[in-house]
Image: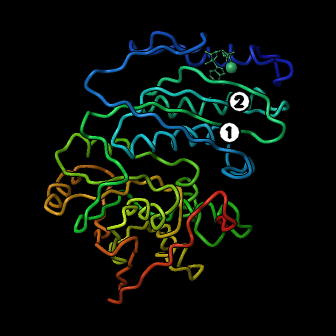
Amino acid sequence: MREMKNLKQLGEFGLIEHLSSKFNTYSKRVKKGIGDDCAVFSTLSNTSQLISTDALIESIHFDLKTISPKQLGFKAMSVNISDIAAMGGTPYLAVISLGLPKTTSIKFIDKLYSGLKKSCDLYNIQLVGGDTIASPKHLFINICILGEAVKNRVFYRKGARPGDQIFVTGNLGDSAMGLKLLRSKNKSFASKNHSDTLVKKHLEPTPRIKEARLLAKSNVKVTSMIDISDGLEQDLAHLCTTEKIGATLYEKNLPFSEALRNACLEKEYNPTDWILQGGEDYELLFTITPRDVKKLNRLFTKTDIPISHIGEITNIPKKIQLKKKTGKTIFLKMTKGFDHFKPNKRS
Ligand code: ADP
Ligand code: MG
């Protein structure tokens, strides 16, 4: 295998054999992993099964000039895991489809898979199969992930009621600023330390599985949940899709890191804009019934990731308001989120 340098030499089947050697230990639940027409596994009887898929394509989702193949593998798996977390579930199985330009080196694929494996090992996920095809130009990665949740503890996007309180895990805006730093020629607008923090949040996001599990196991009444991939404003709007609800956010409670604060100071940006519109933080955004606020805060006191109480659900249909630090309340315009088919792509 060592003398094989690229796909043309190794071929599809040689590659599959090469890859499967890295993923050949499975849990008892997996009856058949890579190597047959389908993978075979058993499910647990008291669970609801969750399935989701997410695709990444070079030049839209990533740029190989700014992300290493190992980071790319790790991120591709992490963003899929985040969707399982967003439902309150635990991931356990995944399959991957790769579209590879013929010139892709085996070294590159090995690094990509080492990132995938790092994420799989961290979250106890078994990679049990996939598909490999040639791509005319760009690298393409699609992962399909399976998870499970305790029955009756699956958290949906729809379900919030006026008066419900809005919470978010971690900090927001870091990932978008990290991307800005990666793309900017003048990286010196943030100190090395802060720049590393922001860029890392963009390239190696941590899906909030631990936090989702904590919520699912508790008896806090979670009324809706989503992971923040497109930005707080847009993802909060997804929680307000019924005609009857909107939301108010409290600017003073919006969480951001010291690194983001410093980068914003340097550039005279308003951190609130980055928090509202910055995507790919993969934090959990959720609503709970008002009487469980204390219970929730108690639940999260012992965790390493803090939660912030950022607002509440209103009865003003589909409007998101921001209660500013000055005391003034404004309606957000809701135009800045990311939509693949609209021209307002992130800059
Ligand atoms: P089929 O022709 O039935 O689609 P393949 O030859 O594509 O079968 O795949 C053979 C085995 O290798 C299957 O178990 C499949 O799940 C697995 N596989 C194919 N590509 C990949 C990949 N990129 N990563 C992991 N497993 C893969
Ligand atoms: Mg196939």
Quarter of image, res 140:
top right
Precedes in sequence: disc 2 or disc 1? 1
Quarter of image, res 190:
bottom right
Quarter of image, res 310:
bottom left
Label 2: element kind: helix
Label 1: element kind: helix
Quarter of the rendered image showing ligand 2: top right
Label ID, residue 203 = none
The kind of residue tagged 2 is Ile
157 displayed left or right of 281:
left
Name the spot of residue 39 as percent of width and height, x first: 52, 15
Q: Which residue was labeled with disc 1?
A: 69
Name the spot of residue 318 as percent of width and height, x first: 40, 70
64 displayed left or right of 197:
right
Label ID, residue 109 = 2
The kind of residue tagged 1 is Pro
Crowding near pointer 2: few (<14 within 10 Å), some, many (20+)?
some
| Marks 2 and 1 close (CB-CB < 8 Å) | yes
Q: Is mark 1 within 8 Å of ligand 1?
A: no
Which residue is found at the position 72% from the left and 46% from the top? 58
Work out whether 271 lies above or below 205.
below
Name the spot of residue 78 as percent of width and height, x first: 51, 41
321 displayed left or right of 187:
left
Colour mapping used in the image: rainbow
74 displayed left or right of 13:
left
Work out whether 316 lies above or below 337.
below
